[in-house]
Image (tube, helix red, strand yellow):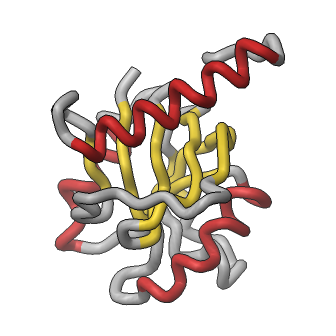
Amino acid sequence: MKFWHMQMHPTGEIRFSKNIDWILEHKKIIGLGQWKEGQDQIDQFINDIKVNDVVALKRGSELIALVQVTGGAYQVTDDTNPETSWIVNRRPVRILDWAIEKRTLPQPRGTLNPCVSNDAETTKIIKQWYQDVLKSFEKRKLDFTV
C-alpha cells in the first residue's frame, strides 16, 4: 500500500476544485483529465496507483478528504455531466475521512504525487491521518482493505 496526494480540477480551473466534495460523495471517484503536459501524471495514475492505496485529496495546500482506491483505472469520454465530464481517467474510491477541521500540507506541489519519503512533513501528516482513521475502523470493526 502506498500513500499519495492529489488535486482534482480541470486544467487551469483550480476554482472548480470546490466541486470535489460533491464528486467524492456522489460519484465515489477520483480522477484526472486528459492533457498533453500531464501525460506522466496520467500514466502514474493509471499504472502506479493500486487498489487499497490511500490518497489525500487537496485544494492547493488544504486537505479535503482521505480516500482508499477500490478498483482499477478506467476512462470515460462520453460523460455529459458538467461536474464530471472533464474527468476522463478515473478510479473508484471509498471515503475514509473528511477534513472537517482545517488541515494543510506544507509541500502542496503538483497534481499527483506519491509520498516517497517517510521524513517529509507531507508524508507524516497523511500517514498520521490514516493512523487516526485506522483506530476508528478498529473500534467499529470495519475492514481496512477491500
Residue at x-position 58% and y-position 29%: 132
Above or below 145: residue 24: below
**Residue 30 horizontal side relative to residue 44, left or right:** right
Residue placed farthest to the front in the image? 101
The picture places residue 83, in percent across and down from the top left corner, at: 66, 79
Total numbered badges shown on the rendered structure: 0
Q: Quadrant of the C terminus?
A: top right
* Closer-to-camera residue (115/128): 128
96 on left or right of 9: right
Q: Position of residue 143 (x, y in %)?
A: 71, 14
Residue at the image position 22 percent from the left and 61 percent from the top: 39
Residue reaching furthest to the right: 140
Front in this rendered view, residue 59 or 19: 59
Q: Would residue 134 be found to the left or right of residue 139 on screen?
A: left
Q: Could you tell me which residue is drawn at 46 percent across and 43 percent down?
A: 55
Quadrant where the N terminus is found in the figure:
top left
x and y percent of residue 78 in the render?
62, 71
Observer-nearest of 36 and 111 = 111
Vertical arrangement, residue 26 with respect to residue 16, above or below: above
Q: Is 95 above or below relative to 64?
A: above
Q: Quadrant of residue 50?
A: top left
Quadrant for residue 77, please give it: bottom right
Report whether 73 appears left or right of 47: right
Residue in the picture at 62% in, 29% down = 133
Q: Position of residue 88 (x, y in %)?
A: 49, 64
